[in-house]
Image (cartoon, helix red, strand yellow):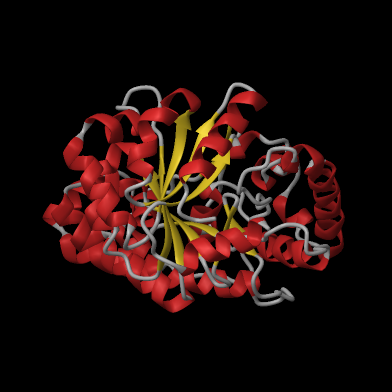
C-alpha cells in the first residue's frame, strides 16, 4: 500500500498531494552508516574488504533491520524502510576520490585532504580503493540478502561542488573569484568521478528494479543522493555557475537523483529547482542557530511562494517540522506537492499528524 501511494505521488503533479512521515529518522531501524561505525573504527578497512566477511556483517545488520519492522509499521504513515544505503559518511567518499585517510570523529567519518592544485591535476579514481571495494561489497550483499522487504539505496555523494570543497578546502570559495577556471575544472572532474564510482559500486549487484530508496522514499532505479550543502553558502549566481550544471550532468548520466541541502539555503530553492532529473528536493531543518524551516514557510510570504512554485517542478521534502506546527502548515501543504516529516513526541501526536494530513490530502 505504501509503495503504491508513493508511486502515485511521483507519477502525478497534483496540487495538494502529500506524503507524510513521522519521526522517520528515529523508528528503530538502524542507519547502516552508524551500525558500521565502530567496526570501521576498530578494524583495518582492507581487512574488511573480503566479500565473505562483508556478507556476514551485512547479514547481522539486515537481521537487526528486520527485528524492527513491527515498530516501524506500527506507525501508519507513508514511510518505507530504506536505511540500507552503502554509505559510511561523506568523508568516506572524499577518501575514495583522493586515496587519503579518514578521521573518525564522534559518529562521523571525515576526510580533509586540502590538496594543492598540482596534486589535484593527478587525481583519478582507483577502483581498488578500499572504500570503493567495501561499498561495492556491502551493496552486493544487501541485494543478495534482500527479500522484497526493504528498499536499497545507491550511493550518497557530495555534489560536485561539495566534493571540490572537500578536496581543495575552504580556499575554493575565494578561488571561485580568483581562479574560476581551475575551480570549474575540478568540479567537472568530481562530477565524472561520482558517476564512475556509482557504476563501479553497483556493477556486481543483482539489482531488482523498483526497489531503490533514500530516506524512506522510493526513488528511480539509478538515483543517488547528492549532498548539496555548499549551495547554501554562496550566491544565486555562483549556484547557477558552480553547482547546477554539474549536478545536472550527474543526474543525466545516472538517470535521476535526490538532492539534499539545508534550511539555511531556502533562498536557493528557485535555483535548485532548475536541476534536471531531480526526483525529490530535500530541505533539512538547521538547528539551532538558523531560522526554523517550518516557521520560515509559515511567516515569510516570499519564500513560501517560491517553495510552493518549486514543488511543482520537483516535489519538496520538508525534513523536520514539529507536530505543534501542523495546523499552520496545512494551508501551505495544500498549495503544493510535498513530502513532510513531523517530529512527534508520542505515538498519539504521530497519529494526529497522519489523520489530519489524510483528511486534506489530494492523494488518496
Q: Please indicate whether residue 313 sits to the left or right of residue 340 in the image.
A: left
- At a point 19% along the width and 37% down the height, the residue shown is 301
Which residue is drawn at the image coordinates 28% and 48% (left, top)?
307
Point out residue 159 in the picture as x, y percentages from the top left corner. 39, 58
Quadrant containing the N terminus in the rendered view: bottom right
Q: Position of residue 354 (x, y in %)?
A: 57, 38
Res. 130 in view: no
Query: Camera-side residue: 231 or 167?
Result: 231
Q: Nearer the viewer, residue 102 or 108?
A: 108
Which residue is outermost to the front? 359
Left or right: 104, with 169 as reference point? right
Q: What residue is at 45 percent from the left and 54 percent from the top?
A: 362
The image shows residue 101 at horizontal and vertical percentages of 55, 48
**Within the image, what quadrant is residue 300 found in?**
top left
Examine the rendering and report whether any part of residue 323 can be seen: yes
- Count the labels in the image: 0
Res. 352 image quadrant = top right
* Residue 13 percent across, percent down from the top left: 39, 64
Picture layout, residue 32 above or below residue 42: below
* Side (left or right) of 225 relative to 294: right
Amino acid at each position: 500500500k505504501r509503495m503504491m501511494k508513493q508511486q502515485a505521488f511521483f507519477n502525478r503533479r497534483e496540487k495538494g498531494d502529500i506524503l507524510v512521515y513521522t519521526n522517520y529518522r528515529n523508528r528503530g531501524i538502524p542507519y547502516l552508516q552508524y551500525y558500521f561505525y565502530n567496526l570501521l573504527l576498530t578494524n583495518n578497512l582492507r581487512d574488511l574488504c573480503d566479500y565473505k566477511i562483508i556478507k556476514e556483517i551485512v547479514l547481522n545488520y539486515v537481521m537487526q533491520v528486520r527485528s524492527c519492522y513491527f515498530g516501524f509499521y506500527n506507525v501508519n504513515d507513508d514511510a518505507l524502510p530504506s536505511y540500507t544505503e552503502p554509505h559510511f559518511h561523506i568523508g568516506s567518499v572524499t577518501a575514495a576520490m583522493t586515496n587519503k585517510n579518514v578521521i573518525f570523529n564522534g559518529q562521523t567519518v571525515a576526510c580533509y585532504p586540502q590538496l594543492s592544485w598540482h596534486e589535484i591535476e593527478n587525481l583519478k579514481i582507483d577502483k581498488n580503493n578500499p572504500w570503493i571495494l567495501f561499498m561495492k561489497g556491502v551493496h552486493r550483499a544487501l541485494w543478495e540478502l534482500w527479500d522484497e522487504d526493504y528498499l536499497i539505496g545507491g550511493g550518497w555523494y557530495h555534489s560536485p561542488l561539495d566534493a571540490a570543497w572537500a578536496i581543495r578546502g575552504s580556499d575554493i570559495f575565494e578561488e571561485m573569484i580568483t581562479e574560476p577556471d581551475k575551480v570549474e575544472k575540478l568540479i567537472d572532474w568530481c562530477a565524472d568521478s561520482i558517476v564512475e564510482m556509482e557504476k563501479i559500486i553497483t556493477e556486481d549487484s543483482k539489482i531488482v528494479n523498483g526497489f531503490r530508496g533514500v530516506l524512506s522514499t522510493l526513488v528511480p532505479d539509478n538515483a543517488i543522493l547528492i549532498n548539496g550543502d555548499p549551495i547554501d553558502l554562496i550566491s544565486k549566481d555562483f549556484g547557477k555557475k558552480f553547482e547546477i550544471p554539474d549536478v545536472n550532468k550527474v543526474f543525466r548520466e545516472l538517470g535521476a537523483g535526490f538532492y539534499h541541502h539545508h534550511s539555511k539555503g531556502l533562498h536557493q530553492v528557485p535555483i535548485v529547482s532548475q536541476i534536471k532529473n531531480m526526483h525529490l528536493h530535500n530541505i533539512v531543518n538547521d538547528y539551532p542557530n538558523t531560522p526554523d524551516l517550518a516557521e520560515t514557510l509559515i511567516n515569510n510570504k516570499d519564500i513560501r511562494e517560491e517553495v510552493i512554485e518549486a514543488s511543482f517542478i520537483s516535489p519538496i521534502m520538508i525534513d523536520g517540522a514539529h507536530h505543534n506546527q501542523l495546523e499552520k502548515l496545512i494551508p501551505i501543504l495544500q498549495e503544493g506537492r510535498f513530502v513532510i516529516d513531523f517530529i512527534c513526541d508520542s505515538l498519539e501526536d504521530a497519529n494526529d499528524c497522519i489523520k489530519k494530513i489524510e483528511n486534506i490530502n489530494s492523494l488518496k
